Each structure stands twice: as C-alpha cells, then as structure tokens.
Amino acid sequence: MHGGASVDPSSAAAAGAIAGSSNSKSTTESTPASGKPDADEEAMRDDDEGDDSDTDGVATSLGMLKVDADKGKSMYIGQEHWHTILADISEVKTYFTNHKKELEKSYEKVMLSKPTSAREGPTFLLGAAPASEVELRAELPPKSAVLTLCSRYFNSMDNAVNIIHSPTFQQQLRAHWQDPSKTPIMWLGLLYSILTLAMLSYHKVGDEPPEWKGRTLELASEYRLRTVQCLIAGDYTKPGEYTVETMLLYVFGEYSARWDADLGLWLIVSLLTRVAFRMGYHRDAKWFPSLTPFQAEMRRRTWALVRMADVVFSHQVSLPSMIYGHDCDTQLPNNIFDEEFGPDTKVLPPSRPKTEPTPIAYMIAKSKLCIEMGDILQATNRVGRQVPYDEILRFDARLREINQELPPHLKVAPLESSHDPVTLIIARFNVNILYLKITCLLHKKYVPRARQNPRYAYSRRVAVEAALETLRHLVTLNRESQADGRLRSLRWFVNSIATKDFLLPAMLVALDLHHDRVAEASNDRRRSDTALFWTAEQRNEMIRNLETTRQIWGTLADGSMEAYKAAKVLDIMLEKIKSPNAAETEALKTESFSSFDNSPEMQPEHNAAVTLGMLSGGMTPNTAAAIESTLQAPGGFGGMDFGVSLSMTGIGMGANFGGGDIGMTNAASPFSMFTNLEAGGDFPANFDWNAFESFTQNANWG
C-alpha cells in the first residue's frame, strides 16, 4: 500500500536520457582512469551544465588516498562506508572530534571485554613456527573429542559445511584412524580447521561440554595454529587437494575468533582466491574430462563460497574485489543431497527442482544474490565512465527477478503464522535481509538526487522501503528474542548482529527524514514539496523504528564500539529530525550530499574531523563474527544471520506524490557472515585521518 502515486522502474527509466559524469574532486587525492578525458566524457560534462547536471555524477567512484610523506605511507580506501551518508551533518562530523576522550575510554572498555585473540593479527600473516608432520598428527585430540567436534560442525546446515562432502569425509576419518601416517597433511589441516570452528561454536553459544568449560577459546586458538602449520607443511603455494577448502575454513575461524573482518583477512582471502584460480576452480569442470563428476560438483560448491568470500570481505574493507564474471564460468552447484553422489559416481543425478528443499538450496540462493551484489559494486564503484541510470534500473530488475525466483521455502512469511523450525525461518529472513541490503546499496546514491530530479523518485522509494523493512527485521528480532519470545534462545545472536546489519538502513532512513524536515522549513516551494514524499503515518513509523534501533544499540554500547558510535549518531539525527533549524535549511541549499565539493572546507588542507568515531566502525566490526562462529550446534541453518522479520507487512512505503529441519535445532555456525554485508555509504569528505589510521592498524573495533 502506498501513500500516493508510485514510480515503477519502467517509468523511472523513461524519465529521460542519462547524462554523463560530473566533475568532482576527492578531498584528498583521486585520479581519473587516464591522464586525458576522451571526447565522449568531455561532451557529457558539457551536457551536465544544464538542469540535469546531477544526473549521474553520483555514480562516480572516487575513493580516498591518504599520503604521509614523512613516514612514507599511503592508504587508499574506497567509497562504500555507511557513515559518509551523513557527511553533510555537521553535528555528526564534529561530535566524535569533540569527545575523543570519551571515545577512547569506550574503546578501552570494549577491548577489555574481548579475548586476547581478538587483538592479534591473523596467525597466517604473522607467521607460525614450523611443525613436522609427525607432530601435527600426534597433536590431534583424542578420537572421541574429534568425533564430537566433527558432529558439531556437520550438524550445521551452512554454506561452508557444504564444501565438505560429509559421507566422504567420514570415510576419510575412519581411514585416518586406521593408519594416520597415510593421511595427507593438507587433509589434516582441513580437520584442524573443522575442530577450530566447532570449538568456537561452543564458546559463542556457551553450551560446551564440562571437559572444555572455560577452555574453548584456548583450544580453538591451538587448532587454528595447527591449521596454519599444516598449510605451511603442505606448501599451499604449490596447491593440491584440500588446499582451498582448508584456507577457506581457516579464514572463517579467524573471522569468528577476532570478531572482525579486517584488512588482514581481506589479504588472506585475496591469496586463497589466487590459489583457487591457479587450481582452475573458476572454470567449470565440464570442460575437463580428467575431473570426475564428484570432483566437478565439489569444486562448484567451493568456488561458490570463494566468490561469496571475495564479495563480502572486499566490501567490508571498501576495497576492490578480485573476481570478475568475465573471468570465470563455473556453474552454481546442483540442488542435490550429499547422499546422492560420491567419489565413485559416474554421472551426477539431475538437479532437483529449485522448489525442493535441500541443504544446498540455501547456498545456491545466497550465491546468486552475492554474485549480483559483486557485479553491482564493481559497476557502481568503477573508475572512469560511470554507470548510466538505465543500467542501475537493469540491475534493479535483475535483483528483483532473483528474489522472485527464490524457492518457496526460502521466501519470507509472517512469523506469527509460521510453524516451521526456527532454523528454516532464519534462513528465509536471512536471504531477505541480504536482498534488502543489496537494494539499499544499489539505489542509495540516488536517494538525495530524487529531491532535485523526479527521475530518481523510484530509487528513493525502493531504497528507503528496503531500509525500513530491514529495521523492521531488527525490531521483530529484538522483540522475539526477549524472555517470552519465540526466539528467546537466540538472544546472544541478536546482540552480536544488532548493529552491523542495520547501520546503512538506519542511516538512509534517518537522513531522508532529516532532509524532509529541513525541506519543510524551506521557503523554496520546489524543495518543500519533496517533504510530502511520505505520508505522516509512514514518517511516524520510520521515527519509531529509529528510536527502537537507538535503544537496542544503546544497550550494547559497553561491548561494541560500533553500537556505541551508532547510538550516538542516531541520538544526533533523531534530535535534528524533531527540531531542524533555519541555519541547517540554509546550509542545505549549498551542500552536496553524495559527491565531493570543491569548497575550501572540503580540500585536503582542511581535512578536519568527521572522525575516527565514524570511520573506525565502518568496517563491519566485531559484532559480526560473534555469531559467525556460533550457528553450529546440532542442526541449524548455520551461516544465517538471524535477521528475523515479518514479511513486507505494516505500512506501505509508497511515494506520496499527491501532496499531501529441514528441522534441526538451533545451531551455532561460524559462517553466517555471508549475510552480514554492512559497510555501505560513501567515504567521508573530511575526517580525522591520523585517528583513523591508528585505529585501522588495530582493526578491532568491537
């Protein structure tokens, strides 16, 4: 239900031809793709001098480069951080600059709440003392412990679990016990990585057996070290069987233990991606008869997870991903059960209908969305000629098609009417949260431009609708995880994802409301008319959800820097939404929302303060991995952010132009990061680079 006339994609596309690039500069340094613009680009810039000069400039990718000549350092970060959505709000830019001591104390408090392993760099990068194959075989825990931990791992229905064929692994494990000396060292590394993830799962959920009580982190750290030693002993630079899979599970173990996806993990993912390329995972096995049908299918599963890891980790640090669609042709996995094929299979069984629930169906759905997300980010962040708005609409149509084609068992439904297992409900909303998040990323740059050009009204509507629906997820999840709620056993999970999954949506909604209130106070009739885009009822719902979100984040502030900063930002924004002033109205007339101005205050020498406060949390911090490691107790759709929500219910968010188990038990999985894609937004035009640099070197933000 819409508050007024709505704008559909076709009408948005037909609104007019797309102009070219706008000529804006980075506040530090940005360079064009070539030294001299071509004639087409110059012509487009000439065209941009007219009324529609803002048409596509918002799609230009600039990024930021910090150069410290004295120290010989340079640091580049892309434009994908959520906090820059609020770059024009002076109070937000200056708050953390004026409260540095408060921020430092909060940071210290948060760090004290983290395990030692969360403050160290990845073992793989820092180096590990070499270990002999004899030592690595001897240091495995007793057989009973190995079986318990492997059961914990395989009972999670998770993307990462799917890259290991359970029946085959069980056979290999039995063979290992019969003669450990014949076990390949890289397979032993795979086993250690499984033990790591299972032990981290026990720690996150808190349901470890008595013999491991209070020792799960220590044991996970030991197994993680052994994983790295196996990778070194097996020489991962000359990759063989199990190398890519072991590196993948190792990365997830680091991510879970460190509660962060930082630059170090991105570097490791880049390395494992190259290893996968070297082994030909990017080419579909149908072209190579030397690969068996079993190998072909397992390589498809592994490559799907490699692509997701590439998209996720690159997005989280706002740097380019490494895999491009034109470089690979590996098909998505088939929708089949592990029991239907094995190493001796001569011909794979036909893929089951996509409507049939299987453990792999979730991975297939997530893969399609992540691949589309990667294509969108590569297109919208590319240097040089920017993306025409028509292409944005084509991406939108493709994204909607993927969502519509999801199998029925993975589509959202009202929570109240569902009697399905909690894990299946979680899977549905997990997929939906990812879809909504990609929608926000695709359209966010055009939300402010819709105020000057009705051509972009569609983008404003769908982005804010998606953002609001995502906040409804949080409100529902928080409510249902209370003591009397259906998801009460998952309260730990709610706390771990409550900030990072909802940063970009909250800021999109907050800023749109802020500009509405400022426009209402404006004497400019054209601008004041844009304040009528939403009905009063719709705006009231937005404010209510923002207030609930702020309250939730406030309760988590002592254990999360991200929650601390996000709560402060929403405090500022809610106050401004409720009482805009004339000075802000005047300032808004000249401020640029999503491109960098040439005004003096935006120049490098005036690169003052948006703050470490905003930036240090922009990298999907530690709240993420807390749960990533946890969905892995017996059963469960591991890897699913419990982004539980009602379906698209409640007040419709249409534009107002009228003026006015699979049934398993709750599992703790280390891999749910693949729905936690928060980073969105552009990089701020001015912020405290020194503070940012010192914090990025730490890379543990809570």
Image (cartoon, grey):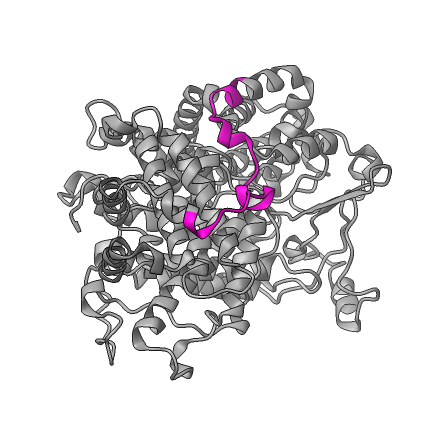
Decide which of 199, 161 is in the foreground and name it.
199
On the image, the x and y values in percent for residue 207 come to 25, 29
Total numbered labels: 0
Residue under the point 24% across and 72% down: 351
* Residue 125 relative to residue 260: left or right: right
On the image, the x and y values in percent for residue 160 come to 35, 53
Give the vertical position of 120 relative to 35 (above or below).
above
Q: Please identify the residue farthest to the left as the structure is shown.
A: 419
- Place residue 237 in its image quadrant: bottom right
- Span highlighted in magenta in the image: 109-134
- Place residue 54 in its image quadrant: bottom right
Decide which of 565, 188 is in the foreground and name it.
188
Decide which of 39, 55 is in the foreground and name it.
39
Give the vertical position of 537 relative to 240 (above or below).
above
- Residue 368 in view of the camera: no
On the image, the x and y values in percent for residue 658 come to 44, 46
Residue under the point 63% across and 56% down: 59
- Residue 320 in view of the camera: yes
Give the vertical position of 105 relative to 643 (above or below).
above
On the image, the x and y values in percent for residue 309 come to 47, 54
Q: Please identify the residue farthest to the right as the structure is shown.
A: 70
Residue 132 shown in magenta: yes
Residue under the point 33% across and 45% down: 640
Give the vertical position of 69 relative to 549 (above or below).
below
